[in-house]
Image (cartoon, rainbow, N blue to C red):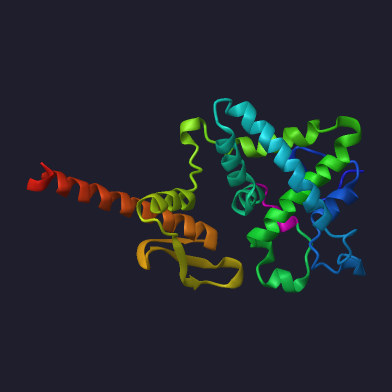
Amino acid sequence: MPPQAPTQELCDRLGYQFSKPELLKQALTHKSCVHDGNARSPQQNNERFEFLGDAVLDLLISELLMDRFPELSEGGLSKLRASLVNESGLRRIANSLDLGQFLLMGKGEEMTGGREKASLLADAVEALFAAIYLDSREKHGLREVTRIVHKLFSSVLPDRVEDVAVRDFKSELQEYVQKHFGVLVTYELMHQTGPDHQKEFEMAALVEQKVYGRGTGKSKKQAGQRAAQQALKTLVAEASSASQEHDESPSGS
């Protein structure tokens, strides 16, 4: 029998009916849930499903990107895949399904914003794809989970290779600084605000103890990338200005 509402609403959004509803229930059960006294067991919560779902997503997203962007290099494919299956990317998929409302969790977790917590939603997305794979593999192999993954992720893919904005600014900045200064870039956490489930961080990128860029984000990693982007822009602009002044000076002519 298909799962009952409200879970049926999730099945409708996925376009998939579970032949084993217990798989869907386990995928939606966070370890904080003590329903029936068993959810803390790995056999009853979704932690093991997260493990499998991570591997399923890596395979299917890799295949999708290779088909969609035949001219993109291995490095470009890896960076784009990482941007899709990281916490932020998976949370976006979770929000498109309104997945938070279907999760089973303990009261403490729910009271601290668990239904909107990025890490929890990302884990649940991975667990959900594992459940679909386990439910359908005997009859359909990877066909059904591939169909659903492609449907959900195709809408967030760029239309052209030129639109793939997955630059690693921290690596680019380090390469530039190493070449021109011969030192390492350092990063400092300047501020953090907000509750635990919705923090915002401000990071600074420093070269020889001087701040060249600042950036904010929902994680230190995101803020660091934005700080590195700003620092790279500042350093390139300074180098260009210095070069122009040299060319215009009498000794440079």
Count the marks: how many?
0
User: Which of the 4 image quadrants contains residue 110?
Assistant: bottom right
**Main secondary structure type of the part rendered in magenta:** helix
Give the residue at x 37% y 52%: 232
Residue 75, how many percent across, how many down? 57, 38
Residue 64 or 232: which is nearer the viewer? 232
Residue 192 horizontal side relative to residue 142, left or right: left
Q: From this viewpoint, which residue is outermost toward the left?
A: 250
Residue 13, how many percent across, how many down? 72, 42
Residue 52 horizontal side relative to residue 222, left or right: right
Q: Is residue 52 magenta?
A: no
Residue 213 or 37: which is nearer the viewer? 213
Give the residue at x 86% y 30%: 140
Residue 205, how many percent across, how many down? 42, 62
Considering only vertical position in the picture, is 147 above or below 198? Answer: above
| Image quarter of the C terminus | top left
Residue 107 horizontal side relative to residue 137, left or right: left
Residue 68, how many percent across, how many down? 60, 28
| Image quarter of the N terminus | top right
Task: Tell me if I can see residue 66 in this picture.
Answer: yes
User: Which of the 4 image quadrants contains residue 137?
Assistant: top right
Considering only vertical position in the picture, is 149 above or below 128? Answer: above
Give the residue at x 46% y 50%: 169
Give the residue at x 21% y 51%: 242
Q: Is residue 97 magenta?
A: yes
Residue 145 or 238: which is nearer the viewer? 238
Residue 24 horizontal side relative to residue 119, left or right: right
Task: Tell me if I can see residue 6 in this picture.
Answer: no
Magenta region, residue range? 96-102
Considering only vertical position in the picture, is 211 above or below 228? Answer: below
